[in-house]
Image (cartoon, rainbow, N blue to C red):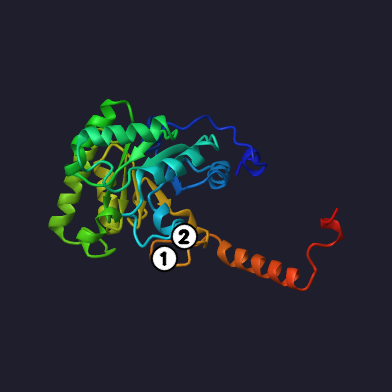
Amino acid sequence: MSPERVSGRNTRAKITAPAIVEMKRRGERITVVTAYDFPTARLADQAGVEVLLVGDSVGTVLLGYDSTLPVTMDDMLHHTKAVSRAKPSALVVGDMPFMSYQVSEEQAVANAGRLVQEAGANAIKLEGGERVAGAVRHIVRAGIPVMGHLGLTPQSVLAFGGYKVQARSEADQERLLREAQALEAAGCFAIVLEGIPAALGARVTRELQIPTIGIGAGVGCDGQVLVSHDMLGLYQGRTARFVRRYAELGDAMRDAYARYVADVKAKRFPGDEESY
């Protein structure tokens, strides 16, 4: 890690969608994490993360919903604004929530425009393959970079019957590859591959000129993404097999709160040094 990042100063140039594509051409791995607020965005950016995804996963890890389906455009605008205020060098990608782009291509362009114009996103992400290719084309024509998302797409959890690994059969794998190619042709600069066999993730990565970002899709993808609350041990629910815990901040926070409670009860806080 560079001295600038260790000291909390990030001197990187602003990362753009074309720069992410160029990373694939150079064979450089791409790091993506979710961020929903100012301090997380600032810390992840200082650590050198290239892409901050303001995911609709905010619904499950921060807002207490059972799925991402209740998340609204107002929710996404609110959290994307907070991340953008950190002025990160990382690319800020705003997630398009459920029913913000499915009704019409005009609706998709308008809501994508709001994430950029009102919330400061540098790009947007939406879920689906060939069925959203038209929306992707229209958004890209409006000058907004688009990241795709295939495989286990959480907004389709009702249709999938739960959070299950996708594209296990040969026919489903061929269909996913066609959909990835359709998204590339429509103008996506990158595609998230979630919850698919590792061999398929590697195959799609080889077939595309744009980067793939894996989450439960194997090491063969061009980059990886994790939900910050999962990797930091802040989410108390069940975590997926593909999650690696890099810290146990939830335990540390619980312990800090417990010590605070104990100190207040025992009149150890505040002390002379915290009093006027």
Q: Which residue is mark 1?
A: 239
The spot of residue 55 in percent (x, y) is: 40, 48
The spot of residue 1 in percent (x, y) is: 60, 44
Marking on residue 60: none
Relative to the observer, which residue lies in front, 245 or 221? 245
Q: CA distance from mark 1 to mark 2?
A: 7 Å
Kindly indicate the quadrant of the structure image that contains residue 138. top left
Say whether residue 22 is visible. no
In this rendering, would 128 be left or right of 254?
left
Q: Amino acid at mark 1?
A: Thr
The spot of residue 149 in percent (x, y) is: 29, 47
Disc nearer the start of the sequence (1/2)? 2
Label 2, residues with CA under 10 Å away: few <14, some 14-19, many ≥20: many
Q: Amino acid at mark 2?
A: Asp
Q: Badges 1 and 2: C-beta atoms under 8 Å apart?
A: yes
For image coordinates 66% across by 70% down, the residue present is 258
For image coordinates 48% across by 67% down, the residue present is 236
Marking on residue 230: 2
